[in-house]
Amino acid sequence: MHAFLLLPLLLIAPLPSQASPQLALDKGCYSCHGEPPRRNVPSVAQLAADYARYRGQADAPRQLADKLRAGGLFAHIAAHERLSPEDCETLMRWIIEGAK
Ligand code: HEC
């Protein structure tokens, strides 16, 4: 119901939900997480399916952003680590909400 009401708005107004795919594009996320994704890398759609379980958790975007920017012990990915905290949180929220 809400989606149908929102759809016309999304098409005419530059709402944040439209800004995020552009941000992901600008930050090079799709060069590894695109379709098809790079070998052993989840696609954005796969990440969204995985992160759907964080929906409704207010502090999840911030926590996931901190984790992504910090990197793993053996996985240092420049595209993750050079994101600003704000951009990273925006992208995590976008992925949690289904990466539309
Ligand atoms: C150079 C390739 C590359 C680029 C560019 C890249 N990623 Fe990743 N990403 C990976 C790999 C490899 C993994 C899996 C390993 C890991 O978790 O560190 C990953 C994992 C992730 C995860 C899951 C982390 C977890 O542990 O749950 C998210 C979310 C993510 N990337 C988001 C992004 C976003 C947003 C961008 C754009 C700013 C981006 N990635 C750009 C390679 C990349």
Image (cartoon, rainbow, N blue to C red):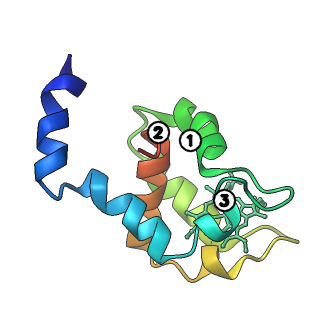
Q: Is mark 3 within 8 Å of ligand 1?
A: yes
Quarter that holds the C terminus? top left
- Asked if residue 78 is positioned above or below residue 4 in the image, the reply reads below
- Crowd tier of the residue under label 3, counting other residues whose Cα lies within 10 Å: few below 14, some 14–19, many 20 or above: many
**Side of 36 where 17 appears, left or right:** left
Q: Position of residue 34 (x, y in %)?
A: 64, 58
Q: Quadrant of residue 89?
A: bottom left
**Do the residues bearing badges 1 and 3 touch, measured as CB atoms within 8 Å?**
no
Residue drawn 37% across and 60% down? 20
Residue drawn 56% across and 65% down? 66
- Residue annotated with mark 3: 33
Of labels 2 and 1, earlier in sequence is 1
Q: Amino acid at mark 3?
A: His
Q: Amino acid at mark 1?
A: Ala
**Side of 80 where 2 appears, left or right:** left
- Asked if residue 54 is positioned above or below residue 5 in the image, the reply reads below
Residue drawn 24% across and 26% down? 3
Alpha-carbon distance for marks 2 and 3?
14 Å
Alpha-carbon distance for marks 1 and 3?
11 Å
* Name of the residue lying farthest toward the top: 1
Q: Which mark is residue 48?
A: 1
**Do the residues bearing badges 2 and 1 touch, measured as CB atoms within 8 Å?**
yes
- Residue annotated with mark 2: 98
Give the foreground label among 1 and 3: 3
Work out whether residue 42 or residue 93 is closer to the camera in this orientation and state it. Answer: 42
Of labels 1 and 3, earlier in sequence is 3
Q: Quadrant of residue 9?
A: top left
Q: Secondary structure at mark 3?
A: helix
